[in-house]
Image (spheres, helix red, strand yellow):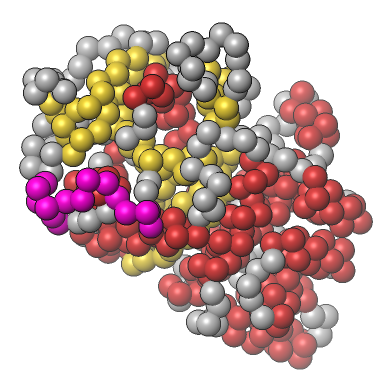
Amino acid sequence: MLAHHTAFRHYINYLQLPWRKTQRKNLIRWAAASLVRQSLPVRRLARTLAPTPQQARQQDNRLRRFLGNERLQFDAALGAYLRFLLPRLGPSAYIPVMLDWTYFGDRAILTLGVPYHGRSLPLFVTVHERTVERRVYSQTQAEISLLRRVRWQWPASATPLLLADRSFDKSRLLEWLLHGTTGKKPHERAPSAPGSHPWLFLIRSCMQATVRDQHGKRLQKRLTVYPGETLCYPHVTYHQTGEFHAHLVVTCARDRLGHPSTWYLLTNLPTAELSATHRAPALRMPPEETYRDYKQGFILSGFGLKGLKRLRRDRLERLLCYVALVCGFLVLVAESEKEVRAAFAQRHFRLSLISFALDVVRVVPQLLLRLARQACASVRLEPVCRKVETPECSRGLTPWRWGLGRSTFTTC
């Protein structure tokens, strides 16, 4: 227990969270207990922290007060976490972030995370009532609120690229991403979004709206494209009423059963980089795997979120923000032992980064402090989208590459 406490304290000191000393101590105590117990219910964590029943009750009350503390500045903590994490992704053209919903019990969880090695690094989480699933307006407002909070804390040195599935193909959200306003008529909008939240996005379109090309010709809802082919339609007008100006990329690939699957991608990336976007949809699965891990338990590299159905909504939101910090710590610990993890992969042990780190925490806790020091000091993460300087690149453009596991794609 002491090794877990010391290692996570070293990580928190590197984060430089703008919290009071007592709040940081409570976070370290909660994280150390969750790493030892690999579970989230507060009563179990209190029993892990204290040997006697009386002391366990005191720890239980302390952890519950910490979860219910409304004075914790999570936006400022998010800014500190981003300033610590994003530079470790190396020189990236863009930092892809995935926005998605998940549901369990009577809760709806909205998460923004960075896809990474088959899972995702959660950055920020908001929790809502399950009924928001049936209210499109409230759902969109929750998405805009989360994106605005994250963008205000995002470092100026990195450029985020929002990835979203078909459920986010909504006129109100598109208007906010492009112009920073909602509910305005086309002639009343600003030419571009204000500096507070200039988002680049890549959203899968359901092609239920009217689409016209740059010459005013209406495009068919089902364009003909063959597997391995990519069609780019720059400067299209999307949505008959909204009249949003963006670019459309149509690509086709075969699924696991060998059937062709067509993707329609709406984006505001520069036109010179449209040909590289057909690789980005492959990043849509990491958040789904992360949600499954959250719900099922540590055997699948999670913490058993299903056991928290009765937790209050505000406390569950704070708890998931703590879990996001713990996940970042575990990924850094796993990346500090790349050779050992590669040896497991060669023996067909399909371990995710978080499950590998949890196994290290459980089996060799005496090495955890050394790994934490190495992870915070020198570990660099592999960028998902990185710039590649090549002499073959023509027209003076800088090529960039999507890294999806072992395969990559370069464009210039």
Apparent side of residue 51 relative to residue 288 in the rendered image (left or right) = right
| Above/below status of 44 relative to 158 | below
Residue 194 highlighted magenta (yes or no):
yes
Q: Quadrant of residue 281?
A: top left
Choose between 201 and 262: the one closer to the eye: 201
| Above/below status of 240 relative to 126 | above
Choose between 202 and 351: the one closer to the eye: 202
Residue 54 highlighted magenta (yes or no):
no
| Above/below status of 271 relative to 374 | above
Choose between 407 and 201: the one closer to the eye: 201
Tell me if residue 43 can be seen. no
Q: Quadrant of the N terminus?
A: bottom right
Which residue reaches farthest front? 396
Choose between 164 and 129: the one closer to the eye: 164
Name the residue at 65% across, 69% down.
Answer: 17
Query: Where's residue 291, x and y in %?
Result: 50, 49
Name the residue at 38% across, 57% down.
Answer: 196
Q: State the extent of the magenta-drawn residues as a range.
A: 183-197
Q: Quadrant of residue 206?
A: top left
Name the residue at 22% across, 56% down.
Answer: 181
Query: Where's residue 155, x and y in %?
Result: 54, 53
Tell me if residue 182 can be seen. yes
Query: Where's residue 358, x and y in %?
Result: 74, 51
Q: Main secondary structure of the magenta part?
A: loop
Name the residue at 84% across, 48% down.
Answer: 374
Which residue reaches farthest right? 366
